[in-house]
Amino acid sequence: MIKLSHLAAGVTAVTVGYASAAVLILQAVTVLGGDSAMQSAWLLGLGLASGITTLFLAWRYKAPILTAWSTPGIILLITALQGVTPEQAVGVFIFSSALVALSGFGGWIERLVRWVPPPIAAALLAGILFPFVLGIIPALKQAPAVILSMLAIYFIAKARAPRLVFILLLLSAIGIPAATGRFDTANLVLELPQWVWIWPEFRLDLMLGIGVPLYVVSMVSQTMPGLFMLRSHGYAPPAGPLLRATGTAGLLLAPLGVFSIALAAITAAICQNSDADSDMQSRYKAAMVSGVVYILFGLLGASIVSLFNAIPAEVIKALAGIALLSVLVNSLTQAFSHKPHQEAAVVTFVVTASGAAFMGLSSAFWGLLSGMLLTHVVSRLYSKPVS
């Protein structure tokens, strides 16, 4: 049976994901020279791909597994697709998704995930989450009355009505701006998307120059953290089938603008923590709600974007940060509770939270690499007796 807390967590997870990245998707279409019809088609394709894979995987493994487009991937594409035709872009998407699907064979991803100590994985997740939670502060400066009201509602609900936390938070994000005259309804629209199917054109230089980096960025910045997030909440579905499912979805729907489907990490955490359900065996229902919402949002892509544009940007940032507060607390607790890994966990957290990219790789990659070096290399130096 679906509970109100499942509905609230599922809707909030997708809302946070769309609000933070939908504009980037529209921008990528513009770079390719696409029109509004192509923009709505991309939102449709991404909503269908994310929704279908989320529904299937959550039901199949009875775990709160969420998929999503790769936000780091779309940021990469906005710069990399300059001068590329839509047909060539689809060829790149198909190639990159094929690499993801192939990564689901051989079991090497599973071995890599097991190789990372839980405190380091938790520190990585905390570093990814921290900038989102930190976003509450500048939002508070821009709209103190609205954000303080949202915080008050969150903490009161957390203490007195934990099952209603997300629904009350979501309602406050819409209701308070509306009540204070900060909800801009001038550009709200209601329209269905158009089906724009683009047949691929394959160019080896673009597949290697854009497709491979897109694959690496999606795997390192989203899929790997997504696997760590699941394990940090006590879920251990096999990694191979998850990759094969997301890769195949991207492969089949690339002509509809599906550039990459990966495991969600940040938004998935909303459905994986105790606010979604005190019974961890039932939290998969929150993910299934997200799957349905993904499909609905895809069918109403342009309308959803106009709704998010009507909500002040600082309220959206605060909504994301407040929704992830509990997850950050849990990640930090797991990261620093094991003394032998504390220094490595601190380095992992700081490097990841810095947001500093280098050589085209995100801070999440460098944070994980730094933590693993300290754990597996420097620890050996300490273990050797001093002569």
Image (cartoon, grey):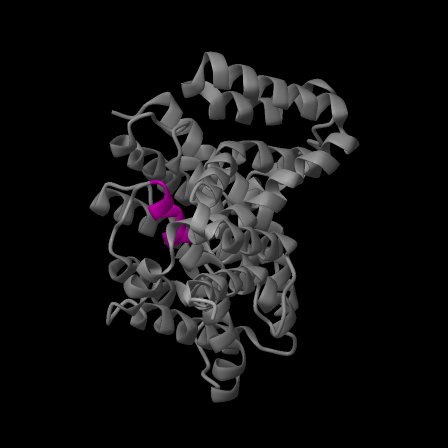
- Let me know if residue 232 is in the magenta part: yes
Image vertical order of residue 158 relative to residue 31, above or below: above
Apparent side of residue 142 relative to residue 191 in the rendered image (left or right): right
Res 121 visible: yes
Q: Quadrant of the N terminus?
A: top left
Residue farthest to the front, as pictured? 387
- As for residue 165 lying within the magenta part, the answer is no
Specify the farthest residue to the left. Answer: 60
Task: Residue at the far right: name it.
Answer: 142
What residue is rendered at 22% in x and 46% in y? 61
Q: Is residue 212 left or right of residue 146?
A: left
Q: How many marks?
A: 0
Residue at figure coordinates x 51%, y 35% from the top left: 329
Name which quarter of the figure residue 254 lies in. bottom left
Quadrant of the rendered image containing residue 355: bottom right
In this rendering, does residue 181 appear at all? no
Q: At which x and y percent is residue 227? A: 37, 53
Report the front residue among 216 and 86: 216
Please indicate whether residue 185 sits to the left or right of residue 280 in the image. Answer: right
302 sits left or right of 178 in the view: left
217 lies above or below 312: below
Label the magenta part by its dominant secondary structure.
Answer: helix
Closer-to-camera residue (24/40): 24
Query: In the rendering, at what x and y percent does residue 87 appear?
Result: 50, 76
Q: Which residues are magenta?
A: 226-233
* Residue 318 % position (x, y): 64, 34
Q: Residue furthest bottom?
A: 204
Residue 49 spot, x, y in % from top left: 38, 54
